[in-house]
Image (cartoon, rainbow, N blue to C red):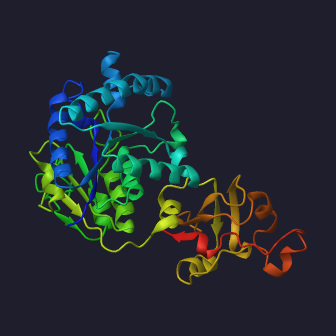
Amino acid sequence: MGKRTVVIKVGSSTVTGADGRIDTDYLAGMAEQVSTLRENGDRAVVVTSGAIAAGLEALQIATRPSDMPTLQAAAAVGQVRLLDAYRDAFNARGAKVGQVLVTRHDVGHRQQYVHACQTLERLLDLGVVPIVNENDTTAVEEIRFGDNDYLAALVGMMVHADLVVLLTDIEGLYTADPRSCEDAQLVEVVDELTEEHLSAAGGAGSAVGSGGMSTKLEAARALMKAGIPMVVCDGRRSGVIVDAAAGKPVGTLFAGGDAAVKGKKLWLAFAGHPKGSVTIDDGASVALCLGGKSLLPAGVVDVTGSFVVGDPISVKDPEGNVVARGLAGMSAEDLHKVRGLKTSEIARVLVAWSGSEVIHRDQLVIL
């Protein structure tokens, strides 16, 4: 088997102990497992949560605050402590770590996304273990990933991972919430996400984190479209990372299969931060989703946001569901003037119109 790349995500409730402090013993054990992967010729990226939790502990703030400035201040303090703990754990095993802080704004622009991909790849080539976290000190609510589960999925796509492992405080996906249902059964393999899986996911997780099983299913949905398998498992189970990488049954495996979305369209679908949206009629929805057509002004019934040519935008059906994303071929200002018009009518409204589509099919990904 050739060299593989494994992305490992550690949740806040796993990286911190019951007392809210960074669990250095746990990180030492995790670093030992990552070292085993590296000795086998694999490469590893760690996506970590825990900066805010570590900062709150350092600042002696007992309850997670709701205001953004305090959360960002806690992240600034905690990120230093968190990286120190990772550096010490990996140094003890002869491995170097490198910090990579990102926001959705960073990867929402195509060129910055490409630069981030190149940086991660170069770190791996140099034998460094990248430690990736959201830059909570600068991210604001509308551009936050919200939970590092989705960030881990995105990093998996960026490094063309062979496997993404989410280490959490639960064994995996259950048929119902095991905290309230005694009959809940562990789902060992998911080949296709269904509404039953989504309804069984429940709400938010532990008090120190920001996500639950539902955010993990969103990560799984993205990775399965990219053809990358993902495992959700109990992060404190002995040897769980090594076992997951070896293909042993741990937690829940979301099978990868063939990639339905590749290359630039992968960025469009999951990383590009939309600058606006267009709502289309039923006829345009059928033409896009089933007919493989470009989106023309005639099918657009509403326009929101302020975008220019080349910006990523979302496409919504009449019910408000996001059915596609693409790169705008027209500005929002121009589209407001010509939405709903036939192609033959547009030239009378836009004198300089070049015949551009709202979104060309080559710049469009169906979700």
Mark yes or no: residue 175 visible.
Answer: no
Q: How many marks?
A: 0
Instruction: Return the residue found at the far bottom.
Output: 291
Q: Is residue 349 left or right of residue 218?
A: right
Residue 28 x %, y %? 16, 34
Query: Residue 281: x percent and y percent?
Result: 64, 73
Task: Please give the name of the residue rendered at 36% of the width and 25% of the height, measured from the top-left corner.
Answer: 80
Residue farthest toward the front in the current orientation of the protein: 126
The answer to whether one can see residue 125 in this image is yes
- Residue 159 point in image, percent of width and height: 38, 56
Quadrant for residue 229, please give it. Answer: bottom left
Task: Name the residue located 40 percent from the left edge and 58 percent from the top edge.
Answer: 157
- Frontmost residue, 215 versus 26: 26
Q: Nearer the viewer, residue 286 or 123?
A: 123
Q: Is residue 195 above or below residue 146?
A: below
Q: Locate residue 108, reporting x and y percent.
A: 55, 51
Reply above or below: 205 against 305: above
Q: Considering the image in quadrants, where does the N terminus appear?
A: bottom left
**Residue at 63% from the left image edge and 53% from the top image edge:** 275
Q: Is residue 78 left or right of residue 346?
A: left
Closest to the observer, 62 or 167: 167
